[in-house]
Amino acid sequence: MKPLLEVKNIQCRYQNTIVVDNLSLHVNQGSLVCLLGPSGCGKTTVLRAIAGFEPVYQGEVIMEGRLMSKPGFMQAPEKRRLGMVFQDYALFPHMDVFHNISFGIRRCPTEEKRQAVEHLLALVGMENFEHRFPHELSGGQQQRIALARALAAKPTIILLDEPFSSLDPDIRENLSVEVRNILKKESITGILVTHHQDEAFAMADQVGVLKAGKIHQFDTPYNLYHEPLDQFVADFIGQGVFLQGTMMSPDTIETELGIIRGDRAYKWERGSKVDILLRPDDVVVAESDNALHGKVVHKAFKGADILYTLQMPTGSKILALFPSHHDHAVGDQVGIALDMHHVVAFPAGRAAERV
Ligand code: ADP
């Protein structure tokens, strides 16, 4: 199957500064893809290049087999059949919900418009809101209407630029899941840009993790968390720390917290120094006499769990996620063990840059 959208080795610049370089992305019909990365890494620029608001200086953008952008050529945005949803809702304040949603299809016959708006309002769970004005709606409701408006013209692809970032975290996560369900129900292809991992994971089938205009890994949320390809992805996705270790054999690594035996073989020589990714859920409570002990230096209550920062006797700090009935105070010594289902290691010395 040919991808619906092919972004091939594009380069984008502002004046002479290259902000996106040699970036490629393939999106299949019906799939939901997210570009995730820290602020300023080029996510919006890529989305704008896809939409036809930014030129490409190298590479191509192809939609449904048709060339949309190449150096010196840019098909107009309105000819790309794209729907867009932005962070700031961008509803027309002087129009009610009916007229906002039907704006893109305002030349259609009245009955067709009425049916389309009815269908879209039902789809976004806002039946009977057609006479309300934007200022009479909550942020989440306005964003549902913005989505309905973007879908009205039956776009080939819908582009969502940080669509839930101005909403409260609770609403953000629920709405991300809901929007995913809506788009899946209608088999709509979507590209989301966000710097919130929870939003990306709740919505997307595949996520491209960007740093400084380059995709470091394009994968499922599960693989990004469990099989990060490099230290940047390991550090940016989820929480965790790196433990220093020394290879003893392809699947056995000596660390300051004991010997870790993994479920995979690494090709590095015996004696090579490595950094091992330790997630908070790799650390479990251990009450035996020979357990390792760490001192609680910080705790964050998460409801069902508590995330502890533990200072180990070796000086390292690690994160541990315990069920919240294991309630310890700052300063307490806590017995722990490592329970790593699989070991993710990288050559040492390329410490991840915190963002
Ligand atoms: P993100 O969406 O990941 O936050 P952007 O794509 O908005 O990142 O920006 C990428 C880089 O390009 C940033 O360094 C930003 O400062 C710069 N940039 C964005 N828009 C412009 C512009 N219109 N003129 C000059 N530089 C810009």
Image: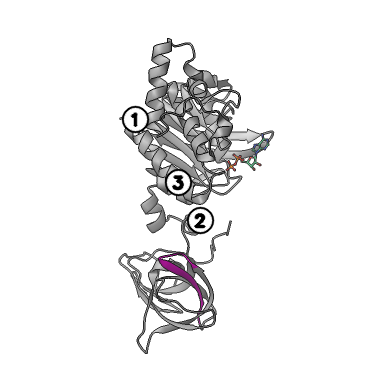
- The mark nearer the N terminus, 2 or 1, is 1
Q: Residue furthest right?
A: 15
Question: How many tags in the picture?
Answer: 3
The residue stretch that appears in magenta: 301-312
The local secondary structure at tag 3 comes to helix
- The mark nearer the N terminus, 2 or 3, is 3
Residue type at numbered disc 3: Ala
Q: Residues within 10 Å of mark 3 (few under 14, many from 20)?
A: many
- For the residue pair 180 and 111, the one nearer the viewer reads as 111
Judged by depth in the image, the label closer to the viewer, 2 or 1, is 1
Please give the name of the residue rendered at 38% of the width and 34% of the height, measured from the top-left corner: 183
- For the residue pair 342 and 253, the one nearer the viewer reads as 342
Please give the name of the residue rendered at 51% of the width and 42% of the height, measured from the top-left corner: 164
Quadrant the C terminus occupies: bottom right
Q: Which mark is residue 186?
A: 1
Q: Which mark is residue 236?
A: 2
Q: Is mark 3 within 8 Å of ligand 1?
A: no
**Residue 343 placement (x, y as % from top left):** 37, 66
Query: Is 82 inside the magenta-drawn segment?
Result: no
Residue type at numbered disc 2: Phe
Q: Residue furthest bottom?
A: 289
In the displayed structure, 240 sits above or below 11; it is below
Quadrant the N terminus occupies: top left
Please give the name of the residue rendered at 48% of the width and 24% of the height, measured from the top-left corner: 101
Q: Residues within 10 Å of mark 2 (few under 14, many from 20)?
A: many
Judged by depth in the image, the label closer to the viewer, 2 or 3, is 3
- The mark nearer the N terminus, 1 or 3, is 1
**Residue 271 placement (x, y as % from top left):** 43, 74
Please give the name of the residue rendered at 41% of the width and 17% of the height, measured from the top-left corner: 114
For disc 3, the marked residue is 200
Q: How far is disc 1 from disc 3 in space, using C-alphas?
A: 20 Å
